[in-house]
Every structure is written in structure tokens, then in C-alpha cells.
Amino acid sequence: MFLLLLLLLAPPPATGHWIIDGNVDNKPFVLHCDLIQTGEALTGTCHDYTPTGKAHRLTSGSVKGDKVRFVYQSNYLLLKFDAVYEGTITATTMSGAASAAGKVGTFSAKRA
């Protein structure tokens, strides 16, 4: 009974602060993301880990079982593009494929 109560009160797997390390087209990056999972929906904001800390609000996101996917819009100079993250999630980690502006790479994340 106590275990069931703990499971019901525990936050969904994706909810929390995440630090993402990635590399797309041989360009490494770090993001700090605050994510909120409600059912299968995923919302939140990711910030570049740079002096400006540019914010990127998720335009879509989902968690289905151990599969996670989220998207935000970004830009480089005059080029606007979607940054897409798709992978697997556990209670403390995420990893998978990242893509942006037609370029592909990988990401891994740890709950902070």
C-alpha cells in the first residue's frame, strides 16, 4: 500500500531539471532544460549554456513509455529551424538522436 502511494505521488519521469550534452554536425552544445510532463504531453523551456542563456520554449513534446520526443524553434543568423530530440528516458537519464537544420547528431542528458 505504501509503495503504491509513493508511485502515485512521484512526479512523471520527464518532469524536472535536465542537463543535456549534445553534438550535431560535429558542433557540441549544452542545454539546461526545465521540463514538465503531464500525462504523455511534455512542455517546458531549454536554455543554451552560454553567457546569453538564450531560452527555447518547447513547441511540442511527448513521453510514451520509455520514448521521449521534444522540439523547439531556434535560429542561426537568418536561418530559423526546429531542433528535434528523440530518444529513450529513464528516471535519471535520456539519450538519443538530435537534429537541427537538416543536420543530425546525438544527445545524452542527466537529471540535475
Image (cartoon, rainbow, N blue to C red):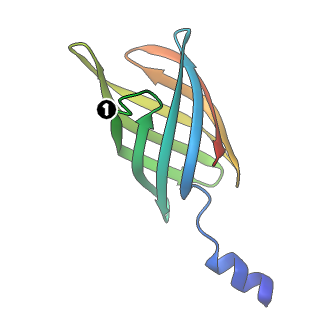
Callout count = 1
Left or right of 30? Residue 1 is right
At 70% across and 85% down in the image, what residue appears?
Answer: 5
- As drawn, the residue found furthest toward the front would be 51
Local SS, label 1:
strand
- As drawn, the residue found furthest toward the top would be 26
Left or right of 98? Residue 74 is left
* Residue 22 x, y percent position in the rendering: 58, 25
At 64% across and 79% down in the image, what residue appears?
Answer: 8
Q: Quadrant of residue 57?
A: top left
* Residue 15 x, y percent position in the rendering: 54, 59
- As drawn, the residue found furthest toward the bottom would be 1
Q: Is residue 10 above or below residue 84?
A: below
At 46% across and 13% down in the image, what residue appears?
Answer: 103
* Residue 21 x, y percent position in the rendering: 60, 29
* Residue 42 x, y percent position in the rendering: 45, 54
Picture quarter with the N terminus: bottom right
Residue under circle 1?
73
